[in-house]
């Protein structure tokens, strides 16, 4: 992953709250970051558990106003999504729905996607206030879904966008936060190609932002596409599927576990 100087000061301001069926088994993972202004909480649980939804709301209520608080909850269809959106409205910045059993991967991919553009010496990054603003633009009652895919080859940009189009199902108004993952600046032409292809597809809705992620965990020629899409719950007859999110073997090295 992206490197930081070994002697860079670190701050324990990224927390992942892993909810369980009993309070005794619930635990908090604290990560350190080199960015003193960051305050990110991600609360992970099962949306079908009344106890876990209640615990998530209780934790979210303790967030400081400047903290970006995101809930990652498994949902099993449109009814689940609407119930979750109503239960957590006003208590978190965004609700991210996940396929059942995929919450852990989704949560780690979400932290990786949000934090990597903030890495040291990243010339095309969003700063923390940008990322916090982009992740909170969804209207009350909306949910977010995360898509992540990695590919390679001469048509990698087109193939990745086609995978996302297939995964997101029927066209509907969306707000999109897009992040293109590259091994380094020599692949910037692929960043521009991803933007061009997304624009040419006439994706409905608004593009909130498009960040570059430099990720040396990607193999030679590999490109990653991460899209966080905000929209209403139950957008089709059966509700839009919440897709599992693939992740790299570890979080960026500049996110150091305490």
Image: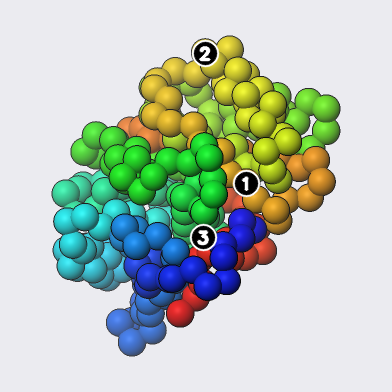
Image coordinates of residue 144 in percent, x first then y, are 39, 41
Foreground residue, 116 or 120? 120
Q: CA distance from mark 3 to mark 1?
A: 17 Å
Answer above or below: position of 144 versus 193. Answer: below
Q: Indicate which disc, 3 or 1, sits on the residue closer to the N terminus.
A: 3
Marker disc for residue 202: 2
Residue 147 figure quarter: top right
Answer above or below: position of 25 versus 162. Answer: below
Marker disc for residue 108: 3
- Look at discs 3 and 1 and give the one toward the viewer: 1
Residue drawn at 62 percent across, 24 percent down: 192
Foreground residue, 76 or 124? 124
Image coordinates of residue 119 in percent, x first then y, are 51, 53
Q: Indicate which disc, 1 or 2, sits on the residue closer to the N terminus.
A: 2
Q: Residue beneath label 1, please?
A: 214
Image coordinates of residue 208 in percent, x first then y, are 39, 29
């Amino acid at each position: 992953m992206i490197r930081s100087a070994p002697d860079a000061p670190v701050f324990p301001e990224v927390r992942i709250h892993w909810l369980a069926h009993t309070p005794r088994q619930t635990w908090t993972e604290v990560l350190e970051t080199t960015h003193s202004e960051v305050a990110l909480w991600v609360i992970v649980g099962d949306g079908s558990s009344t106890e876990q939804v209640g615990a998530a709301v209780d934790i979210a209520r303790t967030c400081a106003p400047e903290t970006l608080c995101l809930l990652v909850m498994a949902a099993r269809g449109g009814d689940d999504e609407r119930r979750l959106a109503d239960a957590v409205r006003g208590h978190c910045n965004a609700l991210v729905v996940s396929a059942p059993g995929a919450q852990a991967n989704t949560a780690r991919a979400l932290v990786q996607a949000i934090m990597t553009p903030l890495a040291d010496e990243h010339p095309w990054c969003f700063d923390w206030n940008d990322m916090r603003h982009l992740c909170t633009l969804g209207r009350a009652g909306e949910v977010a879904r995360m898509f992540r895919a990695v590919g390679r080859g001469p048509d990698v940009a087109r193939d990745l966008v086609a995978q996302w189009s297939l995964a997101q199902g029927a066209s509907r108004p969306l707000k999109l936060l897009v992040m293109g993952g590259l091994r380094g600046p020599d692949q910037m032409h692929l960043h521009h190609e991803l933007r061009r292809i997304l624009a040419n597809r006439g994706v409905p809705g608004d593009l909130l932002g498009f960040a570059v992620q430099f990720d040396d965990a990607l193999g030679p020629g590999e490109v990653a596409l991460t899209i966080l899409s905000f929209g209403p719950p139950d957008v089709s007859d059966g509700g839009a599927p919440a897709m599992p999110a693939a992740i790299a073997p570890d979080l960026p090295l500049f996110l150091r576990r305490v």
